Image (tube, coloured by chain):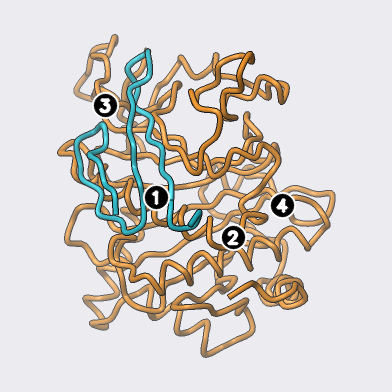
Chain colours: A orange, B cyan
Amino acid sequence: MSELRWHPLLGEWVATAAQRQDRTFFPPEDYCPLCPTKPGQVPTEVPAETYDIVVFENKFPSLQRDPPQPEVASTALAPVAPSQGACEVVLYTPDHHATLAELPVRRIEHLVRVLRDRTRDLSAREDVVHVYPFENKGAAIGVTLSHPHGQIYAYPFVPPVIAREIAQARAHRASTGRCLFCDVRDAERADGRRMLAEEGGWVAYLPFFARYPYETHLAATRCVRTLLELDEGEVRGLARILKRVLRGFDALFGVSFPYVMALHQAPKTDDPYHLHVEFYPPMRSADRLKYLAGSEAGAGMFINDTLAEEKAAELRTKIEARPALER
Amino acid sequence: MTARPSPDGAETPEPGMVKEGIILPDGRYLIYYSFPEDEA
């Protein structure tokens, strides 16, 4: 059973994908479905002995190219729609034990190019309105496969978070004539206390309004809407600033730092938008996690038990203490 | 540059990228991306 069910109280779609209950859950390394297929070994998702970067359709998708017709009927109150769209898996490397933070900058550059290519291809589909690359990293986030990988969801509508950002950006433009995202980025640069790094057309900071202790945003210096508008210098800059921030994360507590990485780009509409990346790390200390509890889950108001200024200083120190990246 | 159509039909103009798509036995597409200039 797989369909989109309308949530009439919140005015948004919920994907029902019951087949995902049976998806692979932390298999032993020898049975990792994301490693290359080795001679004489169990076939994996990738029928090759090695690869650089691979993208494939998720075996357990929430959204798909040719979805089945819903098995439940729509009502006036709760419409139902086919789960149209795409769910892709992006394998960063054949190395089962690597992480994005540990990959060479050059490979991260190539990964950005692959995400740009997928944005181009998926956006060309008539059923796709928004392309969203992301990575869930670490068991604390709920990851079920440890092999380094990201995902791409292609939605047949503008998803709620992006729609809210667009509504705010539209209102800001109407009242000031300026880009909201540029104004936030410039305010962070002018203040300086929450700044983390600048690199090749990109700025990294903990926003003034951070909801998670180490919530980090990367914003393009130029006002670009999607990955498709980045020039080669900005592709390199994004790879470099990603690596610097991720190494800083890992140095915070001496562990491979869990996070959700969300790449936010404009949908296929004319709405005001600005390409940026947001990280939502769940750790608030070396041995404590930030849970989305009563206020966050039930009322939508986040409570951050820390000061962004202090957490930014802590993370900035770690980023600056790391050896310089290769040019 | 080598660019082949992806299994979902769009072209790929990324410089330096080789893109080769296949269809898996269950009908899903899989795309190999490689960057031969780095190996030169």
Label for residue A211?
A: 2
Q: Secondary structure at mark 4?
A: loop
Up the image or down, A230 lies above or below A324; here it is above
Residue in view at x 22 percent, y 19 percent: A75
Image quadrant of residue A235? bottom left
Q: Secondary structure at mark 3?
A: loop
Q: CA distance from mark 1 to mark 4?
A: 24 Å
Q: CA distance from mark 1 to mark 3?
A: 20 Å
Front position among marks 1 and 3: 1
Q: CA distance from mark 4 to mark 3?
A: 34 Å
Image quadrant of residue A103? bottom right
Between residue A177 and residue B27, name the one nearer to us. Answer: B27
Left or right: residue A306 versus residue A263 is right
Residue picked out by circle 1: A114
Check disc 3: other Cα within 10 Å, few if <14, some if 14-19, many if 20+.
some
Are circles 2 and 3 on residues that touch, CB within 8 Å? no
Residue picked out by circle 4: A257
Q: Secondary structure at mark 2?
A: loop
Front position among marks 1 and 4: 1
Chain assignment, label 1: A
Residue picked out by circle 3: A65
Q: CA distance from mark 2 to mark 1?
A: 30 Å
Query: Residue placed farthest to the bottom in the image?
Result: A190
Mark 1 / mark 3, whichever is N-terminal: 3
